[in-house]
Image (tube, helix red, strand yellow):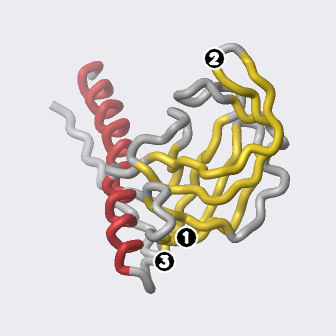
């Protein structure tokens, strides 16, 4: 029997860097609202990074915002060196227990649509790390997490099993 050994390493960004899609374009959230590309044009940075929309629980700051083709993308940093709560949240994100992003905003311009609203202008107030986001597609995409490394390792192991079954 042939064996294939693959070494994997779990990388963690100890600096607390977090990236994600805060709002995917083209699909409604859980209450039926759709936010159009261009609605985030007035976003002011840095933007507060809260935990669970609690204004008394800031854990970092979002320093980059881009309206990409797929949605509003944010990049920021948990203040792991300075705030104890940020270290706790960082551990939850790295473990995969907190994977969602959820935005807090004030609607400036919206039109009703079947099942919700189409929002074309808003003031972005904050973006929170959450367990269950209002938009199912709003999520952390990179935090150099153990979950990310484990899913890569799982894919490698599946490929190795398929390889050994064929030989």
Residue lying at 43% horizontally and 78% vertically, measured from the top left: 80
Q: Quadrant of residue 116?
A: top right
For the point 73% across and 68% down, the residue is 45
Tell whether 55 sits left or right of 155. Answer: right
Element at label 2: loop
User: Are the two marked residues, 3 and 2, in contact with CB atoms closer than 8 angstroms?
Assistant: no
- C-alpha distance separating marks 1 and 2: 35 Å
Badge 3: few (under 14), some or many (20 or more) residues near its Cα, within 10 Å? many
Label 2: how many Cα within 10 Å (few below 14, some 14–19, many 20+): few
Q: Secondary structure at mark 3?
A: loop
Per the image, the residue denoted by label 3 is 79
Residue 40: x %, y % from top left: 78, 49
Whether residues under marks 3 and 1 lie with C-beta atoms below 8 angstroms apart, the answer is yes
Horizontal side of 96 relative to 29 (left or right) equals left
Q: Secondary structure at mark 1?
A: strand
Residue identifier under label 2 = 115
Please give the residue where the numbered disc 1 appears in the rendered image: 77
Q: Along the line of sight, which residue is nearer the eye, 113 or 40?
A: 113
What residue do we see at 36% from left, 42% from top? 151
Q: Quarter of the image for the N terminus: give it.
A: top left
Q: Is residue 129 above or below residue 14?
A: above
Q: Position of residue 31 (x, y in %)?
A: 56, 27
Task: Please say if 40 is above or below 91.
Answer: above
Residue 137 position, x and y percent, is 54, 35
Q: CA distance from mark 3 to mark 1?
A: 6 Å
Q: For marks 3 and 2, give the CA distance.
A: 39 Å
Q: Nearer the viewer, residue 138 or 153?
A: 138
Identify the residue shown where x is 25% and y is 47%. Answer: 5
Q: Nearer the viewer, mark 1 or mark 2?
A: 2
**Upstream in sequence: badge 3 or badge 2:** 3
Picture quadrant of residue 108: top right
Which label's residue is closer to the chain start, 1 or 2?
1
């Amino acid at each position: 029997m042939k064996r294939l050994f693959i070494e994997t390493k779990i990388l963690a960004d100890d600096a607390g860097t977090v990236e994600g899609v805060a709002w995917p374009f083209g699909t409604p959230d859980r209450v039926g609202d759709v936010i159009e590309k261009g609605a985030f044009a007035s976003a002011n940075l840095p933007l507060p990074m809260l935990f669970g929309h609690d204004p008394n629980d800031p854990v970092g700051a979002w320093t980059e915002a881009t309206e990409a083709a797929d949605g509003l993308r944010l990049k920021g940093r948990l203040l792991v060196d300075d705030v104890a709560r940020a270290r706790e949240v960082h551990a939850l994100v790295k473990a995969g227990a907190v994977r969602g992003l959820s935005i807090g905003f004030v609607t400036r311009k919206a039109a009703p649509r079947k099942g919700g609203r189409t929002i074309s202008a808003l003031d972005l107030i904050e973006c929170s790390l959450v367990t269950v986001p209002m938009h199912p597609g709003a999520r952390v995409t990179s935090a150099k997490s153990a979950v990310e490394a484990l899913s890569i390792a799982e894919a490698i192991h599946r490929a190795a099993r398929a390889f050994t079954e064929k030989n």
